[in-house]
C-alpha cells in the first residue's frame, strides 16, 4: 500500500535538520508496511496538487525564503484548504507555521499574506532574534513536547494557539504556541521535531493508518523516547 508525502519547499524551507522529519515519518510508515513516495514541490513548480497527498510537510527557513514560499503557496490556497477540510494530516514546523495565519508584518512594514486558516498574524523585527529551548504542554492530552525556537516575530493574538508554554530557557516571549485544526499541526519548534517528540510522530502514523484502512501496529522506538525524556528532564531541571 502506497503513502504519498507532499514535501513543500525542501530547498527553501529545511533549516536545522528539518528534513529529518520526513525521513523519520517515512521510516515509521515503512515499519507499518507502507511503501512511501515523497513528492517535492517548490517555487519553480507551476502547480502544487494536494489531491493525492496522504501527508503534507513544510519546514523552517530564513525569513526571506519563508516569504517567497508564502507568496507561492498562496496561489494554491484552495487546494490546501480542501485537503485540510478532508482531514489530510499536515505538519508545519518553525516559521512555516507563521504562514497558516492571516499574514506576516515584516520589519520594513511590508505585509505578506498568509493562508488565513488561523486568526493570528506575526509581527517581526530586525533588532534581535528570539531563541531558546522550550517545553510545551498539550492542553488536551497533557503530553509535554520539547524543542528549540529561533524566530524573529511573535503572534499578535493567542486565541487559536493550542499548547501552553511550560518553560523557556532563553529570551523567547512565549506564553502559548502551536495551532491545530483537523489533522493539521503548526508548531514553532525547529529541527527533527518528530525525533524529539515521538508522541507527535506516532499520532500522525495512527491517522495515516486509519485513513488508509490499515491496522496500526504499536512499534517501540526506544532511542526516540529516551531522547525526549532526557531532554525534558534536563530542561525542567535547568535554571531559567
Image: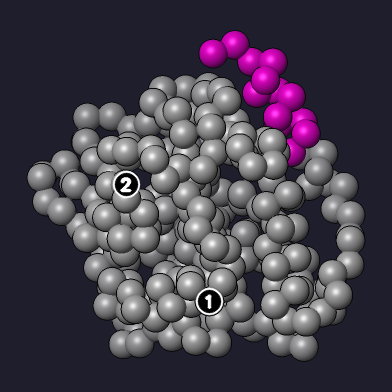
Task: State the extent of the magenta-drawn residues as a range.
Answer: 228-240
Q: Is residue 158 left or right of residue 136?
A: left
Residue 116 to residue 56: above or below: above
| 234 falls in the magenta region | yes
Check disc 1 and report the residue beneath it: 86
Q: Main secondary structure of the magenta part?
A: helix
Q: Residues within 10 Å of mark 1 (few under 14, many from 20)?
A: few
Residue 66 image position (x, y, % from top left): 32, 58
Between residue 22 and residue 120, name the one nearer to us. Answer: 120
Instruction: Choose mark 2 or mark 1, whichever is in front.
Output: 1
Q: Quadrant of the N terminus?
A: bottom right
Instruction: Give the mark nearer the N terminus: 2 vs 1.
Output: 1
Residue 120 marker: 2
Between residue 4 and residue 51, name the one nearer to us. Answer: 51
Q: Is residue 74 visible?
A: yes
Between residue 18 and residue 53, name the one nearer to us. Answer: 53
Q: Is residue 212 left or right of residue 186?
A: right
Q: Is residue 126 left or right of residue 115?
A: left
Amino acid at each position: 500500500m502506497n503513502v504519498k508525502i507532499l514535501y513543500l519547499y525542501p530547498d527553501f524551507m529545511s533549516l536545522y535538520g528539518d528534513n529529518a522529519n520526513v525521513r523519520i515519518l517515512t521510516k515509521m510508515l515503512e515499519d507499518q508496511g507502507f511503501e512511501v513516495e515523497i513528492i517535492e514541490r517548490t517555487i519553480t513548480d507551476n502547480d502544487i496538487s494536494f489531491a493525492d497527498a496522504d501527508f503534507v510537510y513544510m519546514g523552517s527557513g530564513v525569513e526571506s525564503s519563508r516569504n517567497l514560499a508564502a507568496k507561492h503557496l498562496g496561489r494554491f490556497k484552495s487546494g490546501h484548504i480542501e485537503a485540510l477540510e478532508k482531514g489530510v494530516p499536515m505538519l508545519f514546523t518553525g516559521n512555516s507555521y507563521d504562514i497558516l495565519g492571516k499574514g506576516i508584518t515584516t520589519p520594513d512594514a511590508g505585509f505578506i499574506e498568509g493562508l488565513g486558516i488561523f486568526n493570528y498574524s506575526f509581527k517581526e523585527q530586525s533588532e534581535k532574534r528570539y531563541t531558546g529551548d522550550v517545553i510545551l504542554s498539550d492542553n488536551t492530552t497533557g503530553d509535554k513536547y520539547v524543542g528549540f525556537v529561533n524566530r524573529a516575530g511573535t503572534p499578535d493574538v493567542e486565541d487559536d494557539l493550542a499548547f501552553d508554554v511550560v518553560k523557556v530557557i532563553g529570551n523567547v516571549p512565549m506564553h502559548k504556541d502551536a495551532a491545530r485544526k483537523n489533522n493539521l499541526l503548526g508548531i514553532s519548534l525547529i529541527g527533527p521535531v518528530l525525533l524529539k517528540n515521538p508522541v507527535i510522530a506516532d499520532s500522525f502514523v495512527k491517522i495515516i493508518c486509519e485513513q488508509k484502512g490499515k491496522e496500526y501496529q504499536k512499534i517501540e522506538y526506544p532511542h526516540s523516547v529516551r531522547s525526549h525524556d532526557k531532554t525534558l528532564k534536563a530542561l525542567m531541571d535547568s535554571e531559567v
